[in-house]
Amino acid sequence: MATSENSEKPVMVIAIDDSEHSFYALEWTLDHFFAPCISNPPFRLVIVHARPSPSSVIGLAGPGAAEVLPFVEADLKKTSIKVAGKAKEICSSKSVNTTDVESVEGDPRNVLCEAVEKNHAAILVMGSHGYGALKRAVLGSVSDYCAHHANCSVMIVKKPKAGNN
């Protein structure tokens, strides 16, 4: 049975959301691992966007939440399409055209660890929002969770602060 060269390469999963940090991580990764001067990139690229479920966005809103649910769901789908489109644009601008882009509903921690498993990824790349200790304690850190639970290496790309370029 013949296999394509692309399927034999290790998989790199890149996590994206609608933040500038994740798009920076995508661009940085493309520049360093998939640059135009690299005719045969070392990885097959899979970009994963974890989108929240409408009920997780609304939470325990009380009476009337059910009436808002369709609008929240439509807005989340629009955002997901926008995020995937921007990721594809960035890839195309860097001459990386053989990319899988997936949008999966669920908690980002679980979605990303499952994407690593499903794709047998060798590495997971994600941006860092740069939250301080207090915000991380309250919100939780997706990158911290993935660093401890993903069954592959995890690379966290931090966007330099202004003036540190």
Image: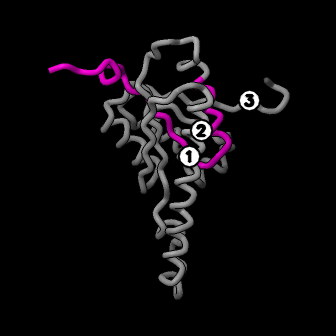
Label 2 sits on a secondary structure element that is helix
Q: In which quarter of the image is residue 4?
A: top left
- 19 with respect to 100 (left or right): right
Q: Residue at (45%, 38%) from the top-left corner? A: 146
Quadrant location, the C terminus:
top right
Q: Residue at (62%, 38%) from the top-left corner? A: 23
Q: Which of 125 and 8 is in front in this view?
A: 8
Residue 85 is marked as 1
Question: Callout 2: 10 Å neighbours few (<14), some, many (20+)?
Answer: some
Confirm whether the magenta stretch covers residue 9: yes
First in sequence: mark 3 vs mark 2:
2
Bounds of the magenta span?
1-30
Task: For marks 3 and 1, give the one nearer the viewer.
Answer: 1
Mark-to-mark CA distance, 3 and 2 = 22 Å
Quadrant location, the N terminus:
top left
Q: Are marks 1 and 2 in contact (CB under 8 Å)?
A: yes
The spot of residue 21 in percent (x, y) is 65, 39
Give the residue type at disc 2. Answer: Glu
Label 3 sits on a secondary structure element that is loop
Mark-to-mark CA distance, 3 and 1 = 25 Å
Pointer 2 residue: 89
Give the residue type at disc 3. Answer: Pro
Pointer 3 residue: 160
